[in-house]
Amino acid sequence: MGLVYALGAYLSWGLVVPLHFRLLGASSPGLILAQRIVWSSLFALALVLIWRARRPVPWPAPVRPRHALLGLSAGLIAVNWLLYLQAVNGGHLLDASLGYYINPLVSVGLGALVLGERLRPVQVVAVGIAALGVLTAVVMAGTLPWVALALAVSFSLYGLIRKVVGVDPTLGFLAETLLLAPFALAYWILTPEPSPREPGAVLLLALTGVTTALPLIWFAAAAGRLRLATLGLLQYLAPTCLLALSVLAFDERIAPHQVPLFGLIWIALVLYAADSWHAARRGSAK
C-alpha cells in the first residue's frame, strides 16, 4: 500500500492539482489561495474529528516552545502555494516544474548547513552541478529564475521546520491552516473581487481543500511504509508531470537559457538519486 499512497500523492501534485487550479483561472491567485486555506482547514478539522471519534489522535504533550515554529511554517507554505498558483495560472508551469526539481537539492544543502548532516562526496558534486546550472541560466538570461528558486527555497524551509517541530503530519497541517484561516477569511470577505457564484465554480473552489489535504496525508502514509530511498526517487514524478503538462498540454516552450539549467539539474538528480539508492542498499545489507 505504501507505493499506492506515494503514487497517489505525487501524481496528484503533478497532474490533478495543476489541472484543478487551471480550471479556476477566472479567479485571481489571491482569492483562490484564501479559499484554499479556508476549505483545507475545514476538511482537515473534519478528518481529525472523525479520527478522534474512532481512536485517540496523538498530540505532543506537553506543548513545547518549538511548536510555535508552526506559525513560520504556515507562512512559508502560504507563500509557496501563492507562487505555485501564480505560476500555474500565469502560464509558467515550467518554472514550477524546475522549482520542484531543485527542491530536493536545496533540502540536502539545508540539512548540511542547519542540521549538521554530513554530505557524501557524490551529494556534494550533485549540489555543485545544480548550482552550476542556476549560474549558467543566470549568465545566459541575465536574470535569476526567481519563481523556481522561490518555490524550491520556500518548500525546503517548510520541510526543515516541520522536521524540527516533530508534530504529527495531519495535526501539523491542521494547525497551520487554522493559523492562516483568519487572514484568509478576512481577505475572502474584504477583497473587492467577487467570488464565483456558479455552482460548478463554487464546487471547484471547495474541492481545493480536498486536493490540498489528501496528497499530504497520502504522502505521510507512504513515508511510514516505504524506504526513504524509494520515496526520494518517486518524488521526481511530480515535477516530471508538471514539465510534460507545460510542454504538451499548455504549449509552453523551453527557453534557450533553460536548456542547460534543466540538463544540469537532471544530471545532479541522477547522481543524487543513485547515491541515495546505493547508500540505502548498503545500510539494509548490514
Image (cartoon, grey):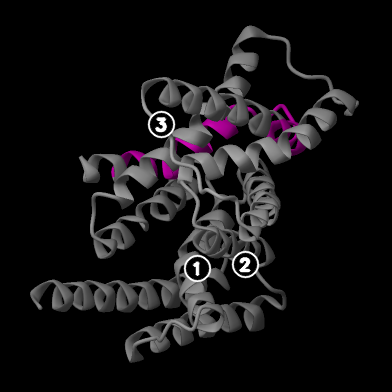
Instruction: Work out whether 279 lies above or below 52.
Output: below
Instruction: Work out whether 278 lies above or below 237.
Output: below
| Amino acid, disc 3 | Pro
Q: Residues within 10 Å of mark 1 (few under 14, many from 20)?
A: many
- Identify the residue under disc 2: 149
The question of residue 142 being in magenta is answered with: no
**Is residue 197 in sight in this rendering?**
yes
Q: CA distance from mark 1 to mark 3?
A: 38 Å
**Looking at this view, is 205 or 60 the one in front?**
60
Q: Position of residue 75 (x, y in %)?
A: 71, 51
Q: Position of residue 259 (x, y in %)?
A: 49, 71
Q: Disc number at residue 56? A: 3
Q: Position of residue 125 (x, y in %)?
A: 40, 88
**Looking at this view, is 250 or 49 the one in front?**
49
Element carrying mark 3 = loop
Specify start and end residues of the magenta stretch as a single range: 7-34
Closer to us: mark 2 or mark 3?
3
View extreme (left): residue: 285
Q: Earlier in the sequence, mark 1 or mark 3?
A: 3
